[in-house]
Image: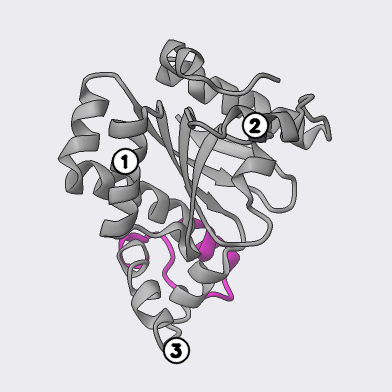
């Protein structure tokens, strides 16, 4: 598998970038790996990087984007934070990744059985974690289908909040970053949500 270069990155469309991620996840769930020489990729990326995707995911130890999408060195920008929440620093990182470096797609990747989502659903308060989990509250408020047991013990409620959180994060990216919104409007990038299943290894894209 070749290392991304300026030429290969420039030749990709947002749809092609999405297809690369889908194919990588298929390899992952089939326990196949693309043939890569990682040491060679270290050498080939030593003078520059030209990743094709920016992925916002959770810090959960089971959700390494490079692994679940079977990507190598120099392929993706990986932004990881509990609950795949958004703040201005992450937005700035995304603007750098897309506008400056030229990635073709932003993926907001949630996952099943997310501890941060469960904590938010249980209204956990603990130090600085309180501020982080508060950023998930809008998704809890927007979840209207669950009438009873609206807490972390209800897997359906947690799943609904997880998915809503992904969509609200995408809405915020478009609303709070005119730079990224313009790139999307011009067709230079795609912003898409997805959910990783920690039991199967499969990623479901919200296309």
Q: Earlier in the sequence, mark 2 or mark 1?
A: 2
Q: Which residue in the protein does label 1 denote? A: 96
Tag shown at residue 116: none
Eye-nearest disc, 1 or 3:
1
Tell me the distance, in whole angstroms, between the alpha carbons under discs 2 and 3.
Answer: 43 Å
First-in-chain label (2 vs 3): 2
- In the picture, the quarter occupied by the C terminus is top left
Residue 88 lies in quadrant: bottom left
Magenta span of residues: 140-160
Query: In the picture provided, is 24 more to the left or to the right than 32?
Result: left
Could you say whether the residue bearing mark 2 is in a helix, strand or loop?
A: helix
Q: Are marks 2 and 1 in contact (CB under 8 Å)?
A: no
> Who is closer to the viewer here, 112 or 48?
48
Quadrant of the rendering where the N terminus is positioned: top right
The mark nearer the N terminus, 1 or 3, is 1
Q: Position of residue 104 (x, y in %)?
A: 40, 26
Q: Residues within 10 Å of mark 2 (few under 14, many from 20)?
A: few
Is residue 141 located in the magenta-colored stretch of the structure? yes
Q: Nearer the viewer, mark 2 or mark 3?
A: 2
- Total labels: the figure holds 3
**Circle 3 is placed at which residue position?**
126
Identify the image's colour scheme: rainbow, by chain, secondary structure or one colour.
one colour
Residue depicted at x 62% and y 36%: 73
The answer to whether residue 135 is above or below residue 8 is below
Which residue corresponds to mark 2?
A: 43
Please tell me in which quadrant of the rendered image residue 153 appears: bottom right
Q: CA distance from mark 1 to mark 3?
A: 32 Å
Residue 38 relative to residue 134: left or right:
right
């Amino acid at each position: 598998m070749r290392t991304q270069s300026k030429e290969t990155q420039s030749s990709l469309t947002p749809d092609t970038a999405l297809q690369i991620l889908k194919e990588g996840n298929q390899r992952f769930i089939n326990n196949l790996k693309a043939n890569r020489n990682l040491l060679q990729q270290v050498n080939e990326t030593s003078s520059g990087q030209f990743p094709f995707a920016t992925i916002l995911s959770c810090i959960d130890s089971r959700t390494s984007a490079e692994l679940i999408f079977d990507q190598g060195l120099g392929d993706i920008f990986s932004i990881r934070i509990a609950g795949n929440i958004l703040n201005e620093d992450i937005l700035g990182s995304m603007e750098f990744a897309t506008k400056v470096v030229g990635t073709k797609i932003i993926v907001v990747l949630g996952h099943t059985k997310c501890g941060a989502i469960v904590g938010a659903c249980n209204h956990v308060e603990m130090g600085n974690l309180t501020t982080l989990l508060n950023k998930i509250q809008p998704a809890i408020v927007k979840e209207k289908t669950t009438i009873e047991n609206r807490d972390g013990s209800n897997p359906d409620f947690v799943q609904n909040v997880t998915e809503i959180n992904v969509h609200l994060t995408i809405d915020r990216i478009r609303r709070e970053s005119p730079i990224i919104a313009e790139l999307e409007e011009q067709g230079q990038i795609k912003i898409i949500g997805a959910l990783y299943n920690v039991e199967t290894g499969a990623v479901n894209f919200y296309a």
